[in-house]
Amino acid sequence: MQEIGVQRKYAPNSICFGCGPANSHGLKIDSHRIENGLVLHYRCQEHHQAFPGMINGGIIGTLLDCHGNWTAAIALMDEWGDDEPPCTVTASYEVKLRRPTPTDSELVITSQVTAIDERKVNVEMLLEANGKVCATGTGMFVAVEQGHPAYHRWS
């Protein structure tokens, strides 16, 4: 039996469009731990299409952004020895769309931490469908402190 995903475990009330379990209209990604990162298995729906049979690039960007953000949060939690991840936000991210991404296939998105510098985490992301690389991404995610609008948004 697979462990509960990090979003449902640490932020069951989150309303984020990409990763919030409590957003009835959202993507509700469900990422799981792997060595030095996370993995996500995801199936898009017909309304996520850009054109028949292919996923919209904005949806791909959202999947990579939210998955990368959670990778950073979990990495900081582990680095700091905390029981819960800090709230992190996206400082920057870049997505490269390598080929059209089919709607009718399971997507496998993996992420790896490439660097941690105090409150900042750099992450690389890879999106594959049918064993082919469809998109890659990089991002820098930052833990926020009290006073920031996103502070404790996951609780």
Image (spheres, rainbow, N blue to C red):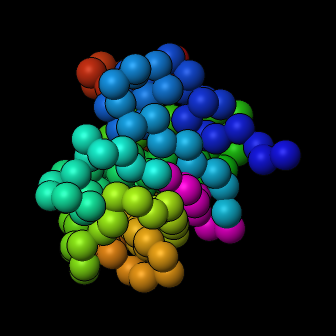
Q: At x 78% / y 47%, what residue is drawn? A: 2
Residue nearest the viewer, comparing 35 with 132: 132
Left or right: residue 53 versus residue 42 is: left
Depth check: 43 or 30 in front?
Answer: 43
Q: Is residue 41 magenta?
A: yes
Magenta span dominant secondary structure: strand
Residue drawn 30% across the image and 45% down it: 46
Q: How many numbered callouts?
A: 0
Residue at figure coordinates x 33%, y 66% from the top left: 102
Q: Residue furthest left?
A: 51
Taking the image as shown, residue 52 lies to the left or right of residue 16, namely: left
Residue 123 appears in which quarter of the rendering? bottom left
What is the residue that sits farthest to the front in this orientation?
52
Q: Is residue 17 visible?
A: yes
Q: Is residue 137 visible?
A: no
The quarter of the displayed image where residue 127 is located: bottom left
> Which region is colored magenta?
35-42
Q: Is residue 130 magenta?
A: no
Find residue 62 and report its horizontal and vertical position in percent: 29, 48
